[in-house]
Amino acid sequence: MRKTKLEAEKSRILELYSNLEKEAAAQESRSAAMSDDFSSRLEDLRLQLGRERLDRLRRGGRYSYWMWMEQNGRSSDAHIINGLRKEFQEVCALEKDTRALERRLNADLDGIVSHLKADLGIREHTEDEKFLCYWLIDLKPDMIAELLGISNNYVYVKTHRLEKRIRDLGKAEYMPLIQKNLTKSI
């Protein structure tokens, strides 16, 4: 009788242990699913934030275009231009210092210029490096052409080649860069 009681107790304990193992495995599975869900949401938010930052910087590029137009006597909205010049000082100094723009792009877009330069094999202090920065902020071809001393047609060629090279990399984080119409024309 005592042996039967011990076996019954042992069987009950083994069953409890088995149930605890199943419950722990189920909890671990739920935790893993939640972790994956949170990771996915975090990645989506990071990409959305990157697109929003890029959108803001591209607007800055268009504002810079307006300022360039004003400097060349093609616009008369000087009070608006001066306010924009203060807001986007890194973009306004394009002719003097592309480094400030690159630092701003890297800071706002999680090191995007550095990553792109590495992935595309673009060297420091080159026309291609400047072109990449100008392209990222969506400067107009005629402004890029003047800043780099090249023709408008060559700007279009370089744009298409750059976009193809980025597309060929196949990295999801770069795809928003080559999607057109991220921002409405201002």
Image (cartoon, rainbow, N blue to C red):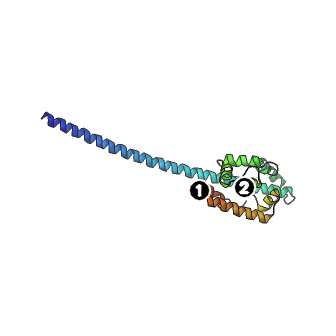
Label 2 sits on a secondary structure element that is: helix
Q: Residue at x 27, y 40 (%)?
A: 16
Quarter of the rendering occupied by the C terminus: bottom right
Q: Which mark is residue 100?
A: none
Residue 12: x, y in percent?
23, 40
Q: Residue at x 81, y 55 (%)?
A: 67
Who is closer to the viewer here, 182 or 177?
A: 177
Q: Which mark is residue 172?
A: 1
The Cα–Cα distance between marks 1 and 2, rounded to whole angstroms, is 18 Å
Label 1 sits on a secondary structure element that is: helix
| Label 1 close to label 2 by CB (< 8 Å) | no
Mark 2 Cα within 10 Å, few/some/many (few <14, many 20+)?
A: many
Mark 1 Cα within 10 Å, few/some/many (few <14, many 20+)?
A: few
Residue 84: x, y in percent?
78, 51
Residue 85: x, y in percent?
79, 50
- Residue type, numbered disc 1: Ala
Quarter of the rendering occupied by the N terminus: top left
Q: Is residue 87 visible?
A: no
Q: N-terminal of the two: label 1 or label 2?
A: 2
Residue 59 figure quarter: bottom right
Q: Residue furthest top?
A: 2
- Residue type, numbered disc 2: Leu
Residue 74: x, y in percent?
85, 60
Q: Residue furthest bottom?
A: 153
Q: Which residue is mark 2?
A: 132
Residue 63 figure quarter: bottom right
Q: Residue furthest right?
A: 73
